[in-house]
Structure formats: structure tokens, C-alpha cells
Image: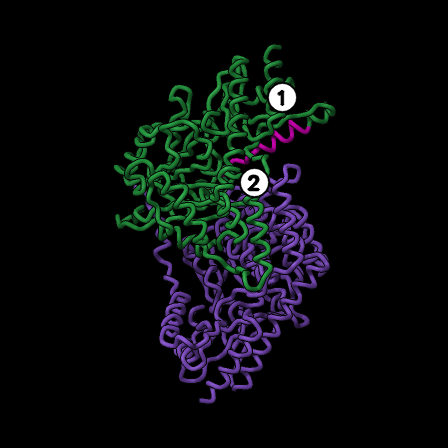
Chain colours: A green, B purple
Amino acid sequence: MSYINENYLKLEDSYLFSTIAKKVAKYQEENPYKKIIKLGIGDVTRPIVPSVVNAMQKACIEMGNKETFKGYGPEQGYDFLREKIVEFDYKKRKIQIDKDEIFVSDGAKCDTGNIVEIFDAANTVAITDPVYPVYLDTNIMAGRKNIVYLPLTEENNFVPQIPKEKVDIIYLCLPNNPTGTVLKKEELKVWVDYAKQNNSIILFDSAYESFITEEDVPHSIYEIDGAKDVAIEFRSFSKTAGFTGIRCAYAVVPKTLKGYTKNGKQVSINALWNRRQCTKFNGVAYITQKGAEAIYSNEGQKEIKENIKYYLENAKIIREGLQNSGFTVYGGKNAPYIWLKVPKGHTSWSFFDDLLEKAGVVGTPGAGFGKCGEGYFRLTAFGDRENTIEAIQRIELASRQ
Amino acid sequence: MSYINENYLKLEDSYLFSTIAKKVAKYQEENPYKKIIKLGIGDVTRPIVPSVVNAMQKACIEMGNKETFKGYGPEQGYDFLREKIVEFDYKKRKIQIDKDEIFVSDGAKCDTGNIVEIFDAANTVAITDPVYPVYLDTNIMAGRKNIVYLPLTEENNFVPQIPKEKVDIIYLCLPNNPTGTVLKKEELKVWVDYAKQNNSIILFDSAYESFITEEDVPHSIYEIDGAKDVAIEFRSFSKTAGFTGIRCAYAVVPKTLKGYTKNGKQVSINALWNRRQCTKFNGVAYITQKGAEAIYSNEGQKEIKENIKYYLENAKIIREGLQNSGFTVYGGKNAPYIWLKVPKGHTSWSFFDDLLEKAGVVGTPGAGFGKCGEGYFRLTAFGDRENTIEAIQRIELASRQ
């Protein structure tokens, strides 16, 4: 008799986006002529930049010729891409990362999800609240019971604080989804020091790194001394270069990073992750990796930075527009996410309903990201300019009613 | 203190292909002018067919235009591809599979590896010997201890036999890697009936389905009555359409398939796999899926069948050439793999050395696929014609020495 992994039955059904979709559909049915503007989902809207399109088209042609055809690639990614990553994302920031510490993958969601497999179920895991739901769900699926929540609140300025309980594995997403918070160097150093003292490991998700605009905000956790001994960094081309439908990301697993057996023996995390990837993954498509490589060309850099600027301008429009309408607003400076405090008397969901009803604008109720998200609301800067401006004007008008 | 998953330490280091590479490099160094012919690795050499290249190029252009750009796609795959799969791979064989039973992925290796996550570690798992190493390794990584080996030997004609022990999960790879064996309908029915009687689940890997040439050999396990209640089928475009460097595959998880809680409650496996994929996977690239869709066009079908024919002709050349040289040979009729019995007095590895030394031909020692592979040797039909012919001529000559 085939037995299932019963940990799956402990997962809460994720009704967030399906509930939103249902409410929106109902509203549209009742208001067939109303244009609904969606600033809810964290997906990009700007097309893939020309350098990347060209590189991928060329790669398609290569795949069609016997002489240049590529079969199985290295599970860890092609050297041509890993070398660019080392050079541009690390060496240029004075960080020394070796090529064989880079693992190219098909997404940061996959990487942050799959990484749980190489750790024991008995670890105590620290996860922020609110949080990107994948961290929590994948730990529940793996049977991890010891989860410590790190509340992100107005009181702590949405900066995760060291918990009283000892934690073995710590998830940090910076710039943060959903709050848009970043940590300054000294704030992040607190966590690196903690991890060093406690032989803990930090899983550092920096998928939104390219949105950082302020000085003294680290773009990589490895800007902090000693972080290579305690942290895995997850990066993605999804938000950096609009790759949500192309699928390319990478994880950095330093060779100095160690985990422990129950007997206290040190084990290389790089070797474990390499084994995991070689056994359960077959590498990213050649065409995709050629596209990712093109991001690092002069043209590519210029083009993707244009898009980031565009989204950051949207973020500014949202942030300032809402502030002018009297809202308390966080994020949106170093992140594509605006975390707004719902007006008194509202819950996340009642504000959602209100905004849809009065302004025809869709956002994401903060409660969907965890208990501490209650009372907040996430808007994203990934829409197009015209719609973003109109959405904010409508919210302004509605808030005067 | 971060604890690792200690099951990883129970894995045997896989020296097979690295040992081969070292031996080949040494031989080449000692014989710099000798052309070595590699018939060892299961990777294709024919380029991607024009229909697919064209479709992917078009999709690249779509990704570069705002109006046709695609961001996140459905985790389960786009409907346009799932519908083609349902129509061509199932309906045409009179099998009724619903669209939402198809899960498009980036590889059968990933799917057969990841599927272990939704099952309890306490299951007893049946795995053939010899075997594709991923089945075994992923089970060890997940902490499964009860593994029953099903020997594939000359005596049982390489057909897996029902074991004495009760088994909960059964891996079947047909056409088989590495032996090239297929099962007739009545032979496969034995396993479906067993699974039905014992509420077991069959994980049916049919990555080599397109190489089947003989009648009465099922192309899908769902050709057997009742299989939809007991089997997950894994398919891949890797060998069907040369997608080893493109990365696209799919799993079929019927909605009637059930697993059990320890309390005997039935749970939908389709729902569990859907949850796993939605949480830890972000779908396959739009460009890739457009490429896969093109395989099902009239032109695409014609083109990929040409390639399959080419490889099957290679298989015939190897099989018949070896037989003429006095070798005992299996497989190669419905599979790209030829499983050859090494001459008396040889082990898998001594034959490897001998073949490299005398003929400059590289194959894979059967012992690398499990204990019962000792005494056998795998050659693959994925080389180009000229090299394949030359390799067989060299083996013929060498065997006369």
C-alpha cells in the first residue's frame, strides 16, 4: 500500500490569489464596462530586452545545426554564464566567489524550495512574518516542526530581530517581499555574526537586488565579512531582466560553508547541493543561459537598467501618490513593492474590497503573507506607467469620498 | 547548529562516468593520433529539427514585444501544449487522459527524482537491477530504507518479476535503460494487476517510448486496463525530439490515482503533485513549450521520426555487427540501447579497457548500473552513422585478434 507524505496534509490551502481572482471576476461581471487595474501580482510586464532576444534567437539557430548543437549541459550551468556572474555580480563588488560556487537553475522559487532537502528535519528554522509563502510551505512539506517566526512590524521598522530561541536555519529576503524593506550593512551584520556564533546557516534571497537605490545597502550578503562561512545566496534574473517566463536564476553556495552531522562532523554544503542538483536536476537550457549571458553585455546592462528604472519610477508614483492621499507607506524605494498601512477600521481584506469597489484597483491583502501582514496591503510597481498613474489617481479620488 | 540530511552520506559516490572519462583521457594521451569513438553516453547528437527551431525563434520574438510578452506561465504547463499531448500521445492510442492530469516539466530526471517527495519514507520500493541510478539515489536521499531489487538477468529475459516481498512503489523503465528490453502487454499487465491488488503505485518511465518498433508492445502503461488507478507515467522530449539541451518533459498523474495515509484514508496523488509543483516549481519557459508544441505539427512529426529512424538504424548496425562478430546481444530493437554480454573471462570493466585499447571505442560497463549489470556492457545508438559503422568495424577486427 503506497503511503503518502502526510506532511502535505498539514499545509494550509493557499486561497490568496484564487480568492482575489474570484472577487475580481465577480466585480467585473457586475461592472462590465469598468477597467480594472491590477497592481497585485509580482509579475513583470516589460518585454525581454533586444540583446537577450537576439542572443536567444542565435542560440536557437545553433541548436538546429549539427556542428553547434548542444545536448546535455553541465548540471551546474555553463562556464560562460557562471564566469559572467562571478565577474559582474561579485568581483565588481569586490567579492571573491569561485565559479564552482555558482549553481545556475530555473528559478529562485525552485532553489529556495529545493534547498530544504539537504538539511535535517530537526533543524529549527526562522522565517519572517509576513513572508514569501514558499519558505514556510516547503519546510512543512519536509516535515519540519520547529519554526520560529520573526515578526516584521512597524515597531521594528520591518527589520527582522534575533529571536530568543536558538535557530539553525534563517530565511532572509532582502529587499523584502512583501514589505519592500532593506537592511543596512550593520543590520545585516547582526545576522551574519549570529549565524557564525551559532553555526547557523542563512538562506539569503536577494531576488530583488537590482532595485536597490540607496547607499550602504548591501547588494549581496557576501559584502558582510564572514558571510561566506554562513550564507547561501539566491539570485534570479526574473525581476532583474524580466525572466519570469524565461526561467533562469542561480544559487551561490560557498565552499567554506559547512553543515553538521548529529555527531558534530562538518560536511560541505557545496558538495551536498552539487549532489542534489546532479541527481535531481539536469541543468538549464542552453538557449536560456545564452539569453542570461547577454544581460551582462554593455547593451544588455543598459537595456535592463532602463526597465528597472521604469519600475522604480512606478514605485515612486505609487509611494508618493499614496502619501499625498494621507496613507502611511513603506517600501518602494529599494524594491518594486509598496507596503501600505490600511486606514483605521479596515482589515487587509476589507480594504481590498473597498479599493476594488471604489477605485477598481486590485492589490494583495497583507494578511495573505502571514498574521503580521494583517492591517497592510501590497501594491507592486510592475504595471505599465499609464495604468499605474491612473490607479493612483483613482485611489486618491476614492480616499476623498 | 545547522544539521544536514545525513541520508546523503549513505549515497555511493558515482564514479562511473568520471572513471570512464579518466581512462579515455589517459588513452588519448598515450595515443594522440587515434580517433576515439564514444558510444557510451545516452545523449543525442542530431540537431533540433527545423519546425522546432522556427517555433522557438518565433517565441523569442514574442517575448521581445510588449503585446505578446509572457511572464509567469502556469506551473502545470500551457494549455496549448497539454492539449497536444492529450490528443497525440493518448487520444490517438485510444487512451482518455484529461488536460489537468498532464504536468509539463523540465525533465524526466527531475520528475522521477522529485516524485519521491510526495510519498512517505516508510514505503517499500521496488527497483530493477541494473537500473537508471536516479531512482535509487533519490530514494536514499529521502531516507527510504526498504528497497527491493528486481534482478534483470538473461534467465528472466530482463523482464522484472513480481518479488516475494510486498512492495508499495514500483519503478519500471520501459523501453529499458540500460538493457533495451520492452514488455509485451500481458507482461506489463502482471504489474498493473499486482499494483491493483496491493494498492501499490507504479512509476512508469517511458522516456524511450518513441523507439518502440514492434507490435503488441504498449507505448503507454495506460494501454493496460486499470492502469490509470495505479500508475504515474513519465515522458520526455529528450530522446523523442533531441531535447536533452532544451529541457522539456511531462508526467501524467491520473485523477483516479490514490495514495494512503497511515490511517488508511485515500488521498489524491494528482492533488499532491499539483501542490508540490506549484510550491517548488515555476513552470517551463514559454519558448520551450512552443518548441515542444511544434513537435506535434505534421512537419514536426515527420522530422522527429526521421531522427528516430536514424538512431534505430544505428542500433541495427550495432546489434547485427556485434552478432556477426559472435557477441550475444540484447536490446536495440525497441530502444537506443544495446546490452551486450561481455566475452567469457571478462568483467564489464576489463572489457571496457580491452575495447578502448584494441578498438578505440568507448561504451559503458554494465556494472555501473547495478550488481546484475556485471558481465554486460551498454552501447548507445545516439552517435552519428559514420562513427557508428566505424566503431562496429573496429570491434569486429579487434574480436578476431
Q: Tell me how far mark 1 sits from mark 2, CA to CA.
A: 26 Å
Chain of the residue where label 1 is placed in the rendered structure = A
Residue B371: numbered disc? none
Q: Residues within 10 Å of mark 1 (few under 14, many from 20)?
A: some
For disc 2, the marked residue is A49
Chain of the residue where label 2 is placed in the rendered structure = A
Dominant secondary structure (helix, strand or loop) of the stretch shown in magenta: helix
| Helix, strand or loop status at disc 2 | loop
For disc 1, the marked residue is A390
Closer to the chain start, of discs 1 and 2, is 2
Residue A8 colored magenta?
no
The structure residue drawn at horizontal position 42% and vertical position 76%, both measured from the top left corner, is: B33
Q: Look at label 2 and name its amino acid.
A: Val
The structure residue drawn at horizontal position 57% and vertical position 64%, both measured from the top left corner, is: A66
Pinpoint residue A186: horizontal percent, then vertical percent.
31, 28
The structure residue drawn at horizontal position 54% and vertical position 55%, both measured from the top left corner, is: B107
Q: Furthest residue to the top?
A: A401
| Residue stretch in magenta | A11-25
